[in-house]
C-alpha cells in the first residue's frame, strides 16, 4: 500500500507483523508513525504503533513491528511525521480498511526478520562476483574506477581536492563508509576527479549519490582528457 501524499509504504506480513517505510533523503533526519487498529472513542489513549526512527536502513527509514495482527475487515488509522531540515512536518490522517487484495499482498511476504549477517555475506559475495566478472571481461575498454565532480574553474575554488571529495561523500550518510576508500584525486579546470579503490566503490557512489552530489562517471565525460598526475 502506498500513501501518495507522504510517500509512505505500508506492508502487512504473514502471519503477523507490519512494515512502514519511506525513502531516505539527505535532508530528512527522522521518520515516525502514530497508528491505531480499529480505533474507538473508548481507546483514545491506546496507540498500537507509535514509533520514531532516525537511522536509515538500505536507503529507507523503516519502522517494523512483528507482533501486530491485522485481519480481514480491520481498520487502520494512521498519520506520519518527518523531521526535515526545514522543520517537523505532520501529514494528514489516513484510513485503510483491510480487504482481500491487501491481505493477498501480505501472503507473498515473509514474516521473518532479515538476518543481517547473512545479508552482509550475500552483499560481499555479490561484490566479489562483480569484481571477478569485471577482471575477466574481454572488453575493448575496461570500466575505470574514476569519478568526476563537475565544477567550472575548479582550481580557483578548491584548495584541497581530496578533502573536497571526501566532504562530498561524507554529506550522504550511506556513502560515509567510502570516504576512506578515495585512493587519489586530480584537479582539472572543469572539476575535481578521484580514483576509488575499486569499480564497485564507484558504482555504489553513482547509484547512491548521483542525484545528491552531481557526481558523474569519469568514463562518460568525453570532453575531459585523461587524468593528470595524482595529487
Image (spheres, rainbow, N blue to C red):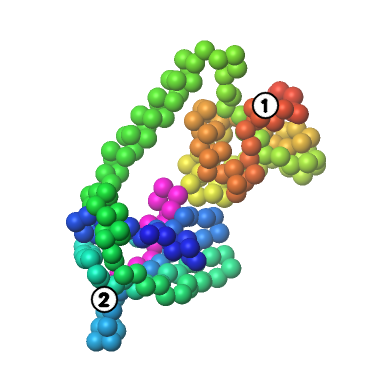
- Find residue 98 and report its horizontal and vertical position in percent: 29, 66
State the residue at coordinates (24%, 70%): 73
Cα–Cα span, label 1 and label 2: 63 Å
The quarter of the picture where the C terminus appears is: top right
Q: Position of residue 190 (x, y in %)?
A: 76, 36
The residue singled out by tag 2 in the image is 38
Q: Which residues are the magenta region?
A: 48-62
Foreground pick, 183 / 59: 59
| Quadrant of the frame with the N terminus | bottom left
- Horizontal side, residue 81 vs residue 20: left or right: right
Q: Which residue is mark 1?
A: 230
| Disc marking residue 219 | none
Residue at image position (45%, 23%) is 131
- Decide: marks 1, 2 in contact (CB < 8 A)? no
Image check: 15 left or right of 147?
A: left
Secondary structure under badge 2?
A: loop
Q: Residues within 10 Å of mark 1 (few under 14, many from 20)?
A: few
Mark 1 or mark 2: which is in front? 2
Amino acid at each position: 500500500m502506498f500513501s501518495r501524499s507522504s510517500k509512505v509504504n505500508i506492508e502487512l506480513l504473514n502471519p503477523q507483523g507490519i512494515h512502514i517505510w519511506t525513502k531516505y533523503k539527505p535532508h530528512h533526519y527522522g521518520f515516525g508513525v502514530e497508528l491505531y487498529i480499529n480505533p474507538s472513542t473508548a481507546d483514545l489513549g491506546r496507540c498500537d504503533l507509535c514509533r520514531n526512527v532516525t537511522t536509515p536502513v538500505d536507503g529507507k527509514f523503516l519502522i517494523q513491528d512483528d507482533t501486530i495482527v491485522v485481519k480481514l475487515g480491520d481498520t487502520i488509522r494512521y498519520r506520519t511525521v518527518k523531521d526535515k531540515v526545514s522543520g517537523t512536518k505532520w501529514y494528514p490522517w489516513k484510513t485503510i480498511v483491510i480487504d482481500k487484495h491487501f491481505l493477498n499482498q501480505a501472503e507473498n511476504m515473509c514474516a521473518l526478520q532479515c538476518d543481517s549477517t547473512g545479508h552482509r555475506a550475500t552483499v560481499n559475495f555479490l561484490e566479489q562476483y562483480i569484481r571477478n566478472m569485471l577482471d575477466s571481461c574481454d572488453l575493448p575498454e575496461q570500466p575505470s574506477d574514476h569519478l568526476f565532480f563537475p565544477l567550472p574553474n575548479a582550481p580557483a575554488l578548491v584548495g584541497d581536492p581530496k578533502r573536497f571529495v571526501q566532504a562530498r561523500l561524507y554529506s550522504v550518510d550511506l556513502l560515509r563508509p567510502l570516504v576512506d576508500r578515495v585512493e587519489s584525486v586530480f584537479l582539472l579546470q572543469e572539476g575535481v576527479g578521484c580514483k576509488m579503490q575499486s569499480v564497485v566503490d564507484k558504482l555504489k557512489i553513482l547509484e547512491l549519490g548521483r542525484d545528491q552530489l552531481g557526481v558523474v562517471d569519469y568514463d562518460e565525460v568525453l570532453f575531459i582528457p585523461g587524468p593528470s598526475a595524482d595529487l
